[in-house]
Image (spheres, coloured by chain):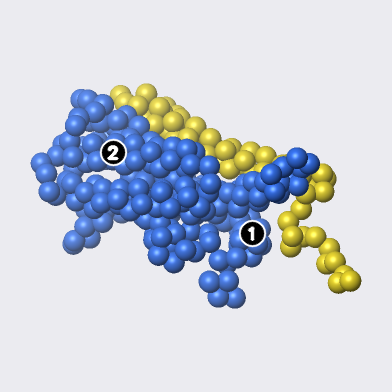
Amino acid sequence: MIFGMNLGPHTDFIVAAYAVAALVLVSMIGWVVLDHRAQKRQLAKLETQGVTRRSERPVEKLA
Amino acid sequence: MALIDYANPTRFLGFTERVLPWLIGLTALVFAAGLYLIQGAPDDYQQGATVKIMFLHVPSAWLSMFGWTVMSVAALGTLVWRHPLADVAAKAAAPIGAAFTFLCLVTGSLWGRPMWGTYWVWDARLTSVLVLFLMYLGVIALWHTVEEPSRAGRASAILTLVGAINIPIIKWSVDWWNTLHQPASVVKLGGPAIHPTILVPLMTMAVAFLLLFVTLHIAAMRNEILRRRVRTLMLMRAQAAPGSAS
């Protein structure tokens, strides 16, 4: 009996399938979130070092 | 704003900031509804409670093929139209597609053991899905092997289009060959052969999985654009460093 459900003689297989699914889906979400943080951190680090894209630099006055 | 305007990575990043919170909320909502419906779904008259594995296995199987289809369309975008976001979309879809294919294989095995008496048989459906998983790993490896993103994009696009031949093989393998895997019971001529008490939770979970795929794909594309910006800035820094060749 799991969450009020009687899963019969194959409970182990059903629980294992849902456990693997939860693990895979949470891992994918974690990978995307952590990767986003890592890239933002890298960009911020480079910007503090003064390395910026041309489009993000202040417009220089023509001499 | 036309769809073509999102070809600009900066505009696409703005689009992701607006759309992702809604997609995350909607995905969580549909997943909650799907799990609630699964909890109330009856056992199948033949499979018993193991039918509950199908609520994970079938959507994963559909998305494993959907992932490669997305990559194939993106591959055309790279090779034919040279769309600036096409190889970003292809690269971002590969690990997500691989994860759903892995989930399809594992849940299928866990269903097969009590129902067929074996975790695995080398029949056409199972083997072609395993080939799909290996192709996903191959494309991911190729992306990591070639350092320059546009070169890696073109090479991966060619491999993806060659591998697309496997998608119709997976779909119709159960019709073309004598397989232990059962033929289609949802997407088939004459309509689904499943009772609504099982079909409704199944389709709800399919929508939840699709929403998750789309959410993760957009988020992974955003990450890839940021990664390329980091790479460009690091190259600029290296070129500006004293003693550099430029």
Q: Position of residue B181 (x, y in %)?
A: 19, 39
Is residue B95 rendered to the left or right of residue A8?
right
Using the image, determine if residue B171 lies above or below residue B2.
above
Have a look at marks 2 and 1 and say if they share a chain: yes
What chain letter is assigned to the residue under label 1?
B
Chain B appears what colour?
Answer: blue
Q: Which mark is residue B192?
A: none
Helix, strand or loop at label 2? It is: helix
Which colour is chain A painted? yellow
Identify the residue shown where x is 22% and y is 25%.
B118
Counting residues from the N terminus, which is met first, the one under dot 2 or under dot 1?
1
For label 2, the residue is B131
Q: Compared to A36, does B106 lie above or below?
A: above
Number of numbered discs overlaid on the protein picture: 2
Residue B168 appears in the figure? yes
Q: Which residue is found at the position 44% from the left and 66% from the top?
A: B81
Query: Residue at (24%, 28%) from the top-left corner?
Result: B120
Q: Which quadrant holds residue B179? A: top left
Badge 2 density bin: few <14, some 14–19, many ≥20, Cα 10 Å = some
Query: Residue at label 1?
Result: B13
User: Residue B17 lies in what quarter of the image?
Assistant: bottom right
For residue B44, side relative to residue A14 (left or right):
left
- Which class describes the residues within 10 Å of circle 1: few (<14), some (14-19), or many (20+)? some
**Where does the image place residue B91, in percent across and percent down from the top left?**
48, 48
